Amino acid sequence: MNTSNQNYIILNKIGIIQTPYTDKAPRQPIANADGTFVLILNAEYSKALKQLDSFKYIYVIYYLDKALWPNELELSKPLKNQQKIGLFASRSPNRPNPFGLSVVKIKKIEKNIIYISGIDAFNGTPLLDIKPYIKKLDAKPDANNGWIDEIEGKYFIK
């Protein structure tokens, strides 16, 4: 084992994400957001899209290149500033490894371009991977909302 690089992983982007967001992006994907949202894969990955259009939804994994290094490992809960939660109990983009993960709907695929529903990424965000969302594997009927259920009005979960 090469111990000199054990704390580093080299990732290659497979494309970019194009969105209308340049200065401000939403904190979560908005399915019916205004604008065009596309994943543009590098041409050498075109064959990897075969049969992807048989799925309705996909996971999009991307690098949050505009995120800040986390300066706190505990954060204030939204709307309840007096209570703290751990960074890993949040969806803050400012993380030790700033990866984004969103489930989006496939609208259409043309060559190496996937047209999708709204995603919470800035225009030009590096695309790292795509995986199909499989209903029988990915939907967990006993999932809960954790500490979010404590927030009065549940402002972003409907």
Image: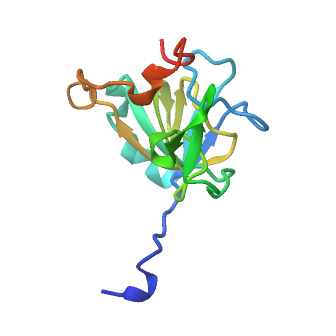
The tally of labels here is 0
**The quarter of the displayed image where residue 31 is located:** top right
The residue shown at (52%, 39%) is 91
The residue shown at (69%, 33%) is 25
The residue shown at (69%, 51%) is 66
Residue 45 to residue 38: above or below: below
Residue 11 to residue 131: above or below: below
**Quarter occupied by the N terminus:** bottom left
Instruction: Give left or right: position of 100 versus 59.
Output: right
Instruction: Give left or right: position of 41 versus 57.
Output: right
**The quarter of the displayed image where residue 96 is located:** bottom right
Q: Farthest residue to the left: give it.
A: 136
Near-viewer residue (54 or 9): 9
Q: Farthest residue to the right: give it.
A: 23
The residue shown at (66%, 50%) is 67
Near-viewer residue (42 or 124): 124
Q: Residue 95: x percent and y percent?
A: 55, 53
